[in-house]
Image: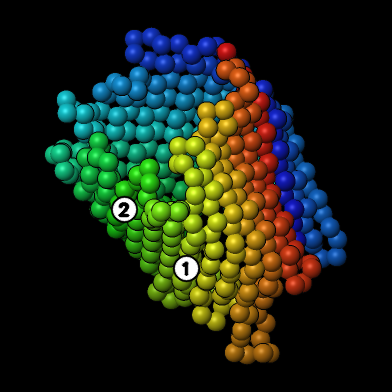
Amino acid sequence: MTGAVCLAGALCMAGGAASTAHAGSNWDFPLSSGYDIYVHDYFLAESDTTEVIQEFNFTAAANGSSEFSARNRWFMRAGLSGGTELYRQSLDTGFRLRNKERHEWLRGDLLMLARQFREGSEYSLSSNNHEGRMTGALSPWTTDNMAVELRARGRYVNYERPSTLEVDYVDGSAGAYLRSPSRSFRTWRVGGLYTARDYPDSGAIDREGFILEGDYDHGRLEGVLRAYHRSERRNIADPDARPSAWFHWTELDTAHPTSRAEVVLRASSEVWDYDEASGAWYDSWQLGGQAGARWGDPLNTRVETLITAEHLEAGDEPETYWQTGLRVGAETLKPELSGSISIEVGRRWYRNSTDDPDSFALEYTDYSYLAFWLMGNWMINEHFSVDVTANFEPESHTEQDDNITLGYGSLRLVWRP
């Protein structure tokens, strides 16, 4: 295992024409310029290596939407960006149609992205590429208690120079759901999808299958109950290239108010069950949990303290581990300052067991970790604000050469006329 450091930063000034409203629509045309830097410092063999990618860029955008109170709603966001490393284009648009009772009966979304790298770009993966995603949902029958929804989704990814790590594919899904009506305070849904994915240059890993999923969300100002489960079957065209598998994902998030604080409990489960486990494709079960308390006003400022735990059970594979930690965090929704911050410290222990002491097996070393997350917006005045995002995660291993630190930082100054 190698040690690594990855840092990124950005400083941008944005400006544009004032928002306008015409015939029930809102538009603005922001302009932004910025600077990004990515630094990757890693240990390879007996030498340290540092890679730095810097980019100056300029972006022009157009954002439009219907009035929030409109019965039928739409939105559109388009952008063009040119930089010292690459050019980018994006289009994100969609609509929502509602009947006279204001129940949503039809919706559609389209997202298009494209990237062209400049000659001599420092990016290691630098093939020009474009992709598109389109989703649609039709609710032919809706009551005050329940709706039937038919869904379809399609996506493609295309690279000018496909490679092992940059692979073209086309996939799609279609299915049916029962869900709560769109105006319901308690939201729920349950249903299933048929899915398929085609790799034009790698037919052996083409796949098809189905998804069964359901979720429930009862969010309140005091107290929360959210639950989600998804089971997916993936049938691979050539089992010798990659085995077929079941995938199961479950999440639970609760917050129960008491006289002194909210008791917070969160849990997650991820299961991979392969028909024939081998090599990189091994059966595993990852369990995670958080427990603690939260204080404060959900519409102002709240703080929380959580004990965290995680376990990956992978049989005799060396990736099997236990992890525990302590997380302290805060969030605020004040008009002049909004965002969240959290710090977690903990320790991970690997099993690293093998039945044959003479055979070669990859081993992982135990480590202590620190994880820091920050995201915030500071409204200096009605025209200027500062946006900041930061992530910093160093690992201190028992084997020093395995130490690794990952991080990201972004700072932006925004002007709104």
**What is the C-alpha distance between the residues marked 2 and 1?**
19 Å
Residue 159 quadrant: top right
Name the colouring of the figure: rainbow
Three-letter amino acid code at the position of disc 2: Asp
- Farthest right residue? 47
Residue 13 quadrant: top right
At 17% from the left and 28% from the top, the residue drawn is 101
Query: Camera-side residue: 38 or 410?
Result: 410
Query: Camera-side residue: 33 or 216?
Result: 216
Q: Position of residue 391 (x, y in %)?
A: 65, 47
Q: Position of residue 180 (x, y in %)?
A: 22, 44
Q: Quadrant of the C terminus?
A: top right
Q: Is residue 285 left or right of residue 345?
A: left
Name the residue tied to disc 1.
287
Circle 1: element type: strand
Q: Which mark is residue 215?
A: 2
Q: Position of residue 295 (x, y in %)?
A: 49, 49
